[in-house]
Amino acid sequence: MPPRRWLFADQLGPHFLDDRRQPVLLVESKAVFRRRAFHRQKAHLLLSALRHRAAELGDQAIHLRTETYREALRAVREPLEVCHPTSRAALRFVRGLDGVTVLPPRGFVTAIDDFAEWADGRRGALRLDAFYRFARQHHRVLLDGDEPVGGRWSLDPENRQPPPKEAGRLDVPPPPMPREDDIDAEVRTDLDRWEREGIRFVGRDGPRRFPATTKEARARLRHFLRHRLPRFGPYEDAMLSTDPWMAHSLLSSSFNLGLLDPLEAVRAAEQAYRGQGAPLASVEGFVRQVLGWRDFIWNLYWYFEPDYQGTNRLAARRSVPDWFRDLDADAVQARCLSGVLADLRDHGWVHHIPRLMVLGNYGLQRGWRPAEMVDFFHRSFVDGYVWVMTVNVVGMSQYADLGRMTTKPYAAGGSYINRMSDYCGSCRYDPKQRAGENACPYTAGYWAFLDRNRDRMPANARMARQMAQLNRLRDVDEILAQEHRRGASPP
């Protein structure tokens, strides 16, 4: 019998064990929830998933509920092994323990050493497109011989359609929602008690919307591939104010809890194309998210220097305001930002475009500290973990590394949101106006951002036109004064 395998709460799928009978240690550390004000639904999902795994394993697992991990480990008097954790802090912790063997990482597709060898061979900045091509070839995914299926590595241009006009929701079956059980009820009771004891959460409680078991996650994957995948691709970048789910898979939390093996999902998507005729653009878009972007971010977290989270080369010094940190959607008049904050408050999740182009874009424009934005995304999303959010936020959303993994800042004015959503039509702000009482906070903020950072951003062909336009604006001073008056108040 192999040694007892200590599973963290993001290592809960069967692929984290070598033997179906392998003894397991599962630990709930209450101190984790004292350190940060997590979203209430994130705390519920994490504890529900861990307790469901303990119930599945039965006598095979020791399940301890303690204040700290060290307290739990003192009660286990046998050698342990653990898969490489997903944060630097956790890795330092387990490597400093006597009697604990640290195994290589699981739950990702491209190995850290393989990524490092690829990255070391690159000249200049690291880019997703190059890594994605490497990963497709390395793992033999969506290939005909040595060439990409369909003749192109990326079909992203086909997957950028705005939402259908006059549509409140996409015409797709809704994702299957889990049925709560006695374990969920127990978790909710415990969280209620913790709140009375002074542990703070953000967001609203609600029915569990995301899988807590591998069985639930696989059922959601099957449903997505069969019923939602065809519409996913074209509208993966679109937003609708009354449809938070659109045609997305809603599987990010399942991957990040370790419930689903990402390569298993990639192979299933490829089979949906080859065997069931699913649209190639949608399949390729899903594969790019999982095999490409997710693994790219994971590996960059370990490839970049340990203090990367503190990178702040745009000198963003403002603190994230309380109304944003606490998801106070009712304080906001800008319809897109209010709607996205409300969805996040109510669900603990919004898809990648509201994250990047509404929440992240707003913080970037206002010069909020990148490390605080990492903390916000980590705490507020059911799929948020340090490894996920560090590079996503510092490098992509907040452009704080000046382009080590992106070609330009993801800053945009109200015209982008107007084109890709239905938010602007009934908003009090006009996306075409950058100055005046009805000036869109995103449009005004965009020009204020460019002016503030004109001497910091590197020369970039993709930004040359915008910087030239900034130099021609006659109302820059008016915009800057207006945005200064707005300050940190909710728009």
Image: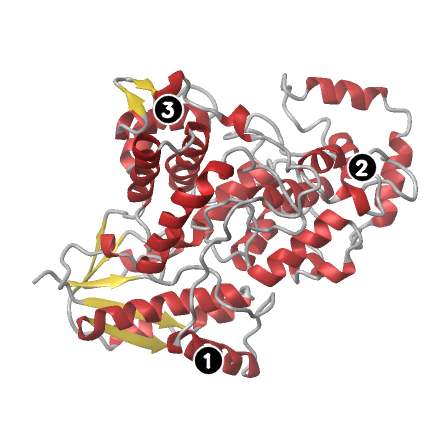
Which residue occupies 37% across, 65% down? 49
Q: Which badge, 2 or 1, is on the more N-terminal residue?
A: 1
Q: CA distance from mark 3 to mark 2?
A: 37 Å
Which residue occupies 80% across, 51% down? 491
Q: Which badge, 3 or 1, is on the more N-terminal residue?
A: 3
Q: Which badge, 3 or 2, is on the more N-terminal residue?
A: 3
Residue that mark 3 sits on:
133
Task: Give the mark toward the camera: 2 or 1.
Answer: 2
Residue that mark 1 sits on:
190
Q: Position of residue 231 (x, y in %)?
A: 51, 38
**Residue 203 circle label:** none
Q: Nearer the viewer, residue 154 or 84?
A: 154
Rendering quarter of residue 3: bottom left
Which residue occupies 74% across, 22% down? 467
- Is the C-beta separation of discs 2 and 1 under 8 Å? no
Q: Nearer the viewer, residue 310 or 217?
A: 217
Look at label 2 and name its amino acid.
Pro
Q: Position of residue 374 (x, y in %)?
A: 55, 50
Q: Residues within 10 Å of mark 3 (few under 14, many from 20)?
A: some
Rendering quarter of residue 453: top right
**Residue 431 circle label:** 2
Look at label 3 and name its amino acid.
Arg
Q: Position of residue 383 (x, y in %)?
A: 47, 54
Query: What element does badge 1 sit on?
Result: helix
Q: Is residue 116 visible?
A: no
Query: What element does badge 2 sit on?
Result: loop
